[in-house]
Every structure is written in C-alpha cells, then in structure tokens.
C-alpha cells in the first residue's frame, strides 16, 4: 500500500493555470504500473471522473477528452511524484482532484486501490 499526498490546488480565474502534485510516500513503490488524476465535481458526489494517467515505468500518458490540449501529466520517478499542469482552466474544471495508483493498466477508478485525500480546484468565471 502507498500513501499519496496531493498539493497545489486553489482558486484561479478562468483562463488561468495551476500545477498539482502528488507525492507517494512509501518505502517502496515497486509494482505500481500506473498513476492517475481523477476529479469529483460538487454536483457529482459519487462520481469520480478520469482526467489523466501516466504509466509509471514507461511514461505513457492518457487523457480524457476534456483534458487534451490543456492539461499535461508528468512524473518524476526519482521523487515518486506525479504532476498535473492545468492550463486554460474553465469553471467546469472546478472539482476536488484526487491522485491514485494502481498495479494494473487501467483508467477506471474502481481498479485504483490507493488514493490521496484530494485537493480542491476552484475556477471562477
């Protein structure tokens, strides 16, 4: 099991940028194949929407259509840290953003067993 800690959320105006970080604090991160960002909007309390994912070993990236061209996911394996650079933010991006880790190659939240506590991103119009 791995402990994930997100940071970098906040309040930003539409068109602005934020950079989220997710640090994996564990003695060993071996065996985890993919890390991802999900978000949960205020009006969708039980739904975690896939945003982006990255293969921890090969760095392959995956994006939801809503994130393509605006968000960039990356990782620093030497620091066990994942990032999400979010540009051209829109009010509909407002949500709690969670990072998660899995030992299989999927982008479905049900298959992610390790989650951070979430960080709030609020985009004002």
Image (spheres, grey):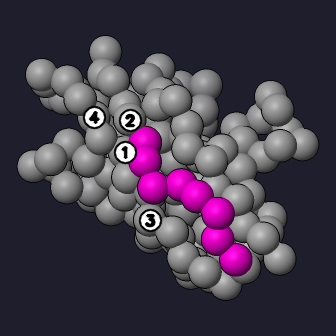
Task: Tell which of 44 and 8 is nearer to you.
Answer: 8
Upstream in sequence: badge 3 or badge 4: 3
Looking at the picture, tell me which residue is in the foreground, 86 or 33: 86
Q: Which residue is the site of mark 4?
A: 24
Instruction: For the residues labelled 1 and 2, say whether their Cβ atoms are less than 8 Å apart.
Output: yes
- Residue 32 lies within the magenta run: no
- Sequence-wise, the earlier of marks 3 and 2 is 2
Q: Of discs 2 and 4, which sits in the foreground?
A: 2
Q: As drawn, is 31 to the left or to the right of 41?
A: left
Image: magenta residue range: 6-13
Residue of label 1: 22
The residue that label 2 is drawn on is: 5
Q: Which residue is mark 3?
A: 19
Residue 59 visible, this orientation: yes
Q: Which of the 4 quarters of the picture holds residue 13?
A: bottom right
Mark 3 or mark 4: which is in front?
3
What is the CA distance from the residue labelled 1 to the residue labelled 4? 7 Å
**Contact (Cβ within 8 Å) of mark 1 with mark 4:** yes
Residue under the point 53% across and 55% down? 9
Q: Is residue 36 left or right of residue 89?
A: left
Residue depicted at x 37% and y 31%? 4
């Amino acid at each position: 099991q791995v402990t994930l800690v997100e940071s970098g959320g906040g309040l930003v105006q539409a068109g602005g940028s934020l950079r989220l970080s997710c640090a994996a604090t564990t003695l060993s991160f071996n065996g985890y194949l993919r890390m991802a960002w999900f978000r949960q909007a205020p009006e969708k309390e039980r739904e975690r929407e896939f945003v982006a994912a990255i293969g921890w070993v090969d760095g392959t990236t995956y994006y939801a259509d809503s994130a393509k061209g605006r968000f960039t996911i990356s990782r620093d394996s030497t620091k066990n840290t994942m990032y999400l650079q979010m540009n051209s933010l829109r009010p509909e991006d407002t949500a709690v953003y969670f990072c998660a880790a899995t030992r299989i190659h999927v982008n479905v939240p049900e298959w992610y067993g390790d989650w951070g506590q979430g960080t709030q991103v609020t985009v004002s119009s």
